[in-house]
Structures are given as structure tokens and as C-alpha cells.
Image (spheres, helix red, strand yellow):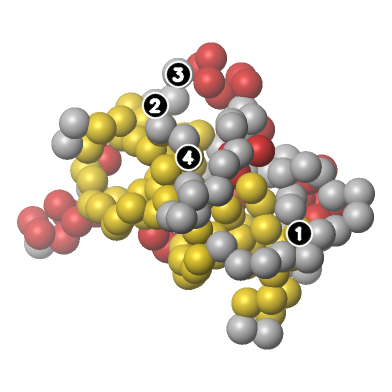
Amino acid sequence: MKAQKAKEKELQLVIFKLGNAIYAVGIKSVRDVIKLIEFVSLPNAPDYIPGVINLRGHIICTIDLRKKFNLKSENTGKTRIMVVMMKNTPVGIIVDEVEEVITIKKSDIDLTPSIIDQHLPGHCIVGIAKYQDKLIILININNLLSPDELKNLNITNGI
């Protein structure tokens, strides 16, 4: 019984980098991690959407998280596409590097400072975790895009 309670107070996260910052999403959101592959550009798409990819016969929209967060965009040999589930729809998220899967205690997570909350789309940053000697920015993948952006991408509850 005690082991089960301890487990409830922990989260498994997939850790990735954007520039010199470390980010994480819940492991349950991540379906796959692949090398950067060629994508097909879409006309009139926002600059943070480089296009779509064909992943094992499925067409998946990609989002360049660096551009979405207004960070310097630079492909490295470690650049990856994390395929995540956003509102029950697979979406490719381009990140600089996927590092590892970790387990942290919920008590090691602080709330996001309100100044950050006010300047990011959809309140996607839900906390800052302390792990070893690192600070990790936690993202709720379902809040990454605004309702209007989701509608424009046809990412609304899997429809």
C-alpha cells in the first residue's frame, strides 16, 4: 500500500532540449522519437509549422517548438521529432535533442512564475522541476496551441 502511494507522487517525463534550456513532457503523451526527416511544406502555414511528414503511412503535422517559443532555430545532428498526442491527434514536435526518461517526485515541481504564464501560448508551461542540479521546464502538450490554432490545424479532439 505504501509503495502505491509513493508511486502516485511521482511523474515519468521525457526530457528534451531547446537551445540551452531543458524541457519535459509526460511520458504518456509521447508516442515515438524519430530523426529529423524531410517534410512537405504547407501553403500559408504559420512559420512554426514547417509542414507534414509521412510516418509509417500516416500524415502528421509538425511543429517547430523552437520557432513557437521564439528561440533561435538551428538543426544539429541530434535534432529529433517527438511524436506526441495532442488532443488525441499525433503531432510531430521538432526539438534540439531528446535526452532521457526520468522519474521525479511531484514535490520537486514548483508552479510556473506568473510572468511566464502571461507571455506563453495557452499556459503550456505548467511548472519548473528540480532534478539533480538541473531546472526542467514542464510542458502540458495539450495547451501548446491556442484553441484558434488547434482549429486551424484541424486538431480538435481527434477530428
Mark 2 residue crowding within 10 angstroms, few (<14) / some (14–19) / many (20+): few
- Is label 2 or label 4 in front? 4
Secondary element at tag 2: loop
The kind of residue on which mark 1 rests is Gly
Q: Position of residue 11 (x, y in %)?
A: 29, 51
Does residue 107 sit above or below 77 in this rendering?
above
In this view, which residue lies farthest toward the left?
Answer: 2
Is residue 135 toward the left or the right of residue 149 in the image?
left
Labels 1 and 2: the sequence-earlier one: 1
Q: Position of residue 154 (x, y in %)?
A: 81, 60
Labels 2 and 4: the sequence-earlier one: 4
Q: CA distance from mark 4 to mark 3?
A: 20 Å
Q: How many marks?
A: 4
Labels 1 and 4: the sequence-earlier one: 4
The reply to whether dot 4 and dot 3 touch (C-beta < 8 Å) is no
Quarter in which the C terminus is drawn: bottom right
Residue topped by disc 2: 111
The kind of residue on which mark 4 rests is Leu
Q: Position of residue 88 (x, y in %)?
A: 62, 65
Does residue 55 sit above or below 110 in this rendering?
below
**Res 62 seen here:** yes
The kind of residue on which mark 3 rests is Pro
Residue topped by disc 3: 113
The reply to whether dot 1 and dot 2 touch (C-beta < 8 Å) is no
Residue topped by disc 4: 18
In this view, which residue lies farthest toward the top?
Answer: 115
Residue topped by disc 1: 51
The kind of residue on which mark 2 rests is Leu
Mark 4 residue crowding within 10 angstroms, few (<14) / some (14–19) / many (20+): many
